[in-house]
Image (spheres, grey):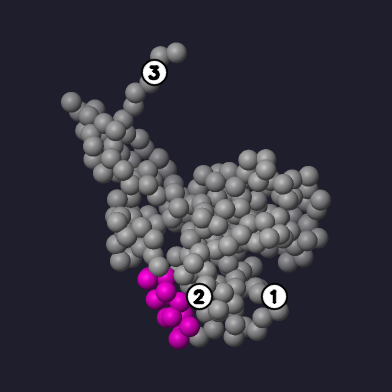
């Protein structure tokens, strides 16, 4: 088999990486998602990262949603004064659709090679009486807090935003806005800054286009 050498690429992304709740997430994409939690747990998540739940409707993982209204319902038994909605950047990886009760892979999807399970809205599952979209990301390292979508008051909002700024990942290729200085997208688990194999120029793997100068020589 003959080897193939190539330099440069062009790719197309959803501009804000934010699908509507009724759209299926595409494998290998970064998406904006939300997670509802208490004030104290929000502080812990921001400073130490997410931890995988022991179990749940879709088994172990980090439970998130692209529908902010879904996240605003959690924690279910908490008062509104103790609810925070974290805005996230989630690297979906390979996605499995779970759309019915007692689905054969409802809790075993990760062992089948999937990184995220997706429950579409209004699919009729009794386990989701709200009918709102839900996702479970198996690896907590695929989920990063980027902002605060909802907080009980301004003081807590500012405190949590400051914690996010202090714990922002990837300082070597980011600026004060939390975006990659190379590809200009918000930082997330999929970012990787390196040198082009051909011309040696600094590139990010999420660049929408890279024209290698080696092609011009």
Q: Position of residue 122 (x, y in %)?
A: 73, 58
| SS under mark 3 | loop
In this view, the residue farthest toward the top is 1
Where is the N terminus found, in terms of image quarters?
Answer: top left
The residue depicted at 65 percent of the width and 84 percent of the height is 79
Membership of 55 in magenta stretch = no
The residue depicted at 73 percent of the width and 51 percent of the height is 107
Mark in the foreground, 2 or 1 = 2
Residue 215 in view, yes or no: yes
- 161 is higher (above) or lower (below) than 21: below
Membership of 159 in magenta stretch = yes
What residue does disc 2 label? 43
Q: Give the range drawn in magenta.
A: 154-166
Which of pointers 3 and 1 lies earlier in the amino acid sequence?
Answer: 3
Q: Is residue 121 left or right of residue 49?
A: right
Which of these two is toward me, 44 or 191? 44
């Amino acid at each position: 088999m003959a080897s193939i050498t190539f330099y440069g690429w062009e790719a197309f992304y959803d501009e804000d990486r934010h699908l509507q709740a009724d759209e299926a997430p595409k494998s290998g994409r970064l998406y904006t998602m939300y997670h509802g939690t208490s004030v104290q747990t929000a502080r812990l998540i921001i400073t130490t990262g997410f931890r995988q739940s022991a179990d749940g409707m879709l088994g172990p993982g980090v439970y998130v949603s692209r529908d902010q209204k879904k996240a605003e319902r959690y924690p279910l038994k908490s008062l509104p004064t103790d609810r925070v909605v974290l805005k996230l950047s989630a690297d979906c990886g390979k996605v499995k659709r779970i759309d019915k009760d007692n689905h054969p892979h409802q809790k075993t999807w990760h062992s089948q090679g999937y990184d995220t399970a997706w429950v579409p809205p209004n699919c009729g599952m009794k386990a989701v009486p709200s009918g709102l979209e839900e996702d479970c990301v198996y690896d907590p390292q695929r989920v990063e807090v980027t902002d605060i979508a909802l907080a009980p008051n301004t003081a807590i909002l500012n405190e949590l935003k400051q914690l996010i700024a202090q714990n922002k990942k990837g300082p070597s290729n980011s600026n004060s806005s939390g975006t990659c200085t190379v590809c200009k997208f918000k930082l997330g688990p999929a970012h990787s800054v390196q040198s082009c194999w051909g011309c040696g120029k600094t590139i990010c793997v999420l660049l929408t286009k890279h024209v290698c100068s080696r092609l011009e020589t």
